Amino acid sequence: MGIFDRISLFANQLGWWFMALFLRDEDVLNTVSMDSMLEAIESMQQHYGHGEAYNLPRRKIIGSSGMLAVMGGGLFYEGVLGVKTYTVVNGAYSFQVSLYDAGTGALLLYTQANRLGQLRTGATTGVAVKHLSNTGASTVGIIGTGYQASTQLEAVCKVRNIKRVKAFSRNQDNRRKFARSMTNSLGVEVIAVGSNREAVEGSDVVICIAATMEPVVEGSWLKPGTTVIGAGPTTWRAREVDDGALDRANKVFVDSAEQALSEAGDMAGSVDRGVFQWSQVLELRHAVAGMVAGRDNADQIIYAKLMGTGIADVAAAKLAYETAKTAGVGMEMDW
């Protein structure tokens, strides 16, 4: 028996040896559904609202050729901790999440998280729309038709009876292709429109998921009762809605008040201009937990800036871990 085998045997006898699961993006794609992700994110928000979870805000290390970001959280009600790291180099993103047993410190899961993050981001919007929009919302305007846009629509269509979607992006071919693809996959009428204004006007729900630095939604375009979701850039320099939209919003929600100070550019700019105050910000978790009302009447305009949180990534990773273990997917290794 070699030295490694002896150490392995000794560790097993003492209960020190653990099997960690490793997942690839395709494993997540094949096992984790939007329905289950919506349940996981909503449950997390409920527990988070009652103080049974902790969010570690995003931190960034910016170098000459790229960036490393770190974020995480603890689901105390599930007994797990986790951290997400990702790099951005030359415009290319690479995401990973590690999940740990809070009682033993053992690594449970290490997973690629490009697909996981796409599901998590869409589900967060879905949960926000479920708790903030009018129950009869049936028309969506979406600005941005890139990688994240499909799961945004998928999630919203699962929480509301959506009958028509107006999609806009700067590239005409892209928005037309997106409209055809989503019509086929969702069974909902999705049409490509020629401007962001056309996408917004008359919509019950407006989703901003475009890589924009300047506002793509103006307050004067919003009808009473509209719910606006800002799920795009997370930098204090980027604005998705103008001052008019924030001024008309009866309630403003975020998924992390702490992150909003440095990541919600539309709010930060409006504060500087005296249009908006940080004291007006509410957190989505408290609406989901029933501690504050998502809206007080059908005519209120609601804005939610969703930056993405580490705690949501941990909830998503916990779901992926359980789903993959049940399905026998992934690679297990001694750790």
Image (cartoon, grey):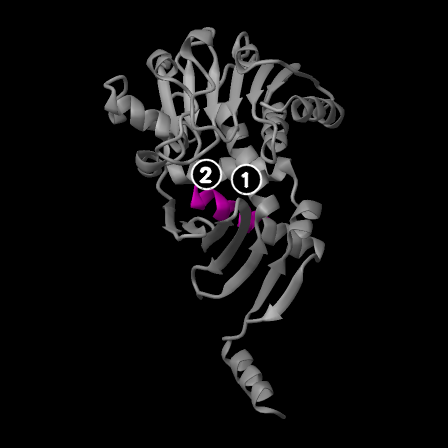
Query: Residue lying furthest right in this view?
Result: 184
* Amino acid under disc 2: Gly
Q: Kindly identify which numbered label has been placed on residue 120.
A: 1
Evaluate whether residue 164 shows in this view.
yes
Q: Kindly identify which numbered label has been placed on residue 157.
A: none
The image shows residue 130 at horizontal and vertical percentages of: 52, 24
The local crowd at label 1, few if under 14, some if 14 to 19, many if 20 or more residues have their Cα within 10 Å, is: many
The secondary structure type at the circle numbered 2 is loop
Q: Which portion, as a residue range, is magenta?
A: 309-319
Q: Earlier in the sequence, mark 2 or mark 1?
A: 1
Q: Residue at x 35, y 41 (%)?
A: 51
Up-down relation of residue 261 to residue 214 (above or below): below
For label 2, the residue is 308
Lateral position of residue 9 relative to residue 244, left or right: right
Q: Which one is in front, 211 or 157? A: 211
Residue 317 is inside the magenta segment:
yes
The image shows residue 236 at horizontal and vertical percentages of: 35, 33
* Amino acid under disc 1: Arg
Up-down relation of residue 104 to residue 280 (above or below): below
Query: Label 2, label 1: how many angstroms apart (C-alpha)?
Result: 8 Å
Evaluate whether residue 75 shows in this view.
no
Point out the image quarter for the N terminus.
bottom right
Q: Residue at x 47, y 52 (%)?
A: 84
